[in-house]
Amino acid sequence: MLHFFYSLFFRIALPFVLLRLWWNGRTKPDAFVRWRERLGYAEPSKEPVIWVHAVSVGETIAAAPLVKALLRRNPDIPVLMTAMTSTGSARAKALFGDQIRYAFSPYDTPGAVRRFVDRVRPRALVIMETELWPNMIALSKQSDVPIFLINARLSARSARGYERVASLVKPLLRSISWIAAQADEDAGRFLRIGARPESVSVTGSIKFDVEISDEVRSAAARLRLKLGTDRPVWIAASTHEGEDRQILEAHQQILAQYPNALLVIVPRHPERFDNVAELAGSMGLEVVRRSAAGDTSDNDEQPFQVYVGDTMGELLMLYGACDIAFVGGSLIERGGHNPLEPAAWGIPVLSGPHIFNFETIYNRLEAGEGVYITPSSNALAECVVHLVADKQAAESAGHNALAVVNANRGALEKVVDGIVERI
């Protein structure tokens, strides 16, 4: 019954959703492009595909090693990646070019999902992390498509939310062929809210299998030369509205101790690039934007104090050009973002206190003394100043973070093996 009302609500809301999509498309054309795919009118497949669903940029990046491994293991089976956002779709194209197909995910109405499934003919549906779309799952199951929930995580907060709609969630979980959970705690929560015990495994997080290519390392080294090798450089990555000012205030405190310090700030969403650059300027800070400056600087003395990372797909490289990394979405109750990319560079990792989205990963980093949790902007500033002043402490923290990454690698192979065995 709850599923019926969910679908009814979505059907009623759909005209308004499309209207908003059109409205956003007036200023952001990518938001409206290929809108028919969102109603299920994807390009028909000549043969069955492995459908990999990754909602936005973060999930797309997390899915990339998995997709690459599936292409190596089964080069004859085409892969279709879907995303809900234009930035997620664009990131997938940048990563894979013409190796795979792309489409926007259909809106979760019975008609749109049914059309999509009939047209793309999925051989399997691979869902990244915890995107439980009722009609996507129910209609894929109805079409005998095996469904895999990969890199699955479930915070205590999310589990409590799902328990409130147990009559909707339990049938969905029982339709999933395999849940590859990141940790024992995640597996236990999935079981508690209705998953079948035989369908749940603990594989670890494929995010620990992050690889930094020689090309990315070279690009990071070139950028650092331009930013300045004789100044402290720290990055605040994937920041959200509500914490940018806190980070910029922390940087002002750092500048009082180290006047040549540089903050690289990378907003999570591209529509906020302008706002963050303007905010930094309004606070009296000298600002340079990567899109304008690239790897170059007109002044060898690097007078700027804030470098805004306003390009897409370069975050991993930007981490490598910095000495210390703060991972955003954590000074506000957003739940944090993936800290493993800076950890893989072997640099100190800092975070605010709100990290429930990556609870298991942060627990392992804390156990390995590979992360600093800073509860406020003042504490953030103090921590950066401490690490700049104490090179040995910074080196130790970076070494510990990298050691945690290396100790937890191997999930990717387990996940790929599990998928291949089941399709």
Image: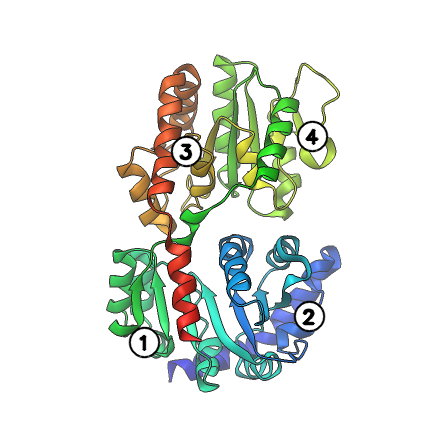
Residue where numbered disc 1 is placed: 170
Q: SS for tag 3? A: strand
Decide which of tag 1 and tag 2 comes sooner along the chain. Answer: 2
Residue where numbered disc 3 is placed: 349
Residue 147 appearing in the image? yes
Using the image, determine if residue 31 lies above or below residue 175: above
Decide which of tag 3 and tag 1 comes sooner along the chain. Answer: 1
- Front in this rendered view, residue 128 or 146: 146
User: Which residue: 33% across, 72% down?
Assistant: 165
Q: SS for tag 4? A: loop
Nearer to us: label 1 or label 4: 4
Q: SS for tag 1? A: helix
CA gap, disc 1 and disc 4:
51 Å
- Front in this rendered view, residue 368 or 109: 368
Give percent across and percent down for residue 414: 37, 60
Asked if the residue under mark 2 is in contact with the one under mark 1, i.e. CB atoms within 8 Å, the reply is no
CA gap, disc 4 and disc 2:
36 Å
Residue where numbered disc 4 is placed: 295
Residue where numbered disc 2 is placed: 35
What residue type is disc 1 on? Lys
For the N terminus, the image quarter is bottom left
- Front in this rendered view, residue 412 or 366: 412
Give percent across and percent down for residue 362: 34, 43
Q: SS for tag 2? A: helix
Decide which of tag 4 and tag 2 comes sooner along the chain. Answer: 2
What residue type is disc 4 on? Asp
Give percent across and percent down for residue 69: 50, 59
Asked if the residue under mark 3 is in contact with the one under mark 4, i.e. CB atoms within 8 Å, the reply is no
Quick check: 365 left or right of 278? left
Nearer to us: label 2 or label 3: 3
Give percent across and percent down for residue 70: 51, 63
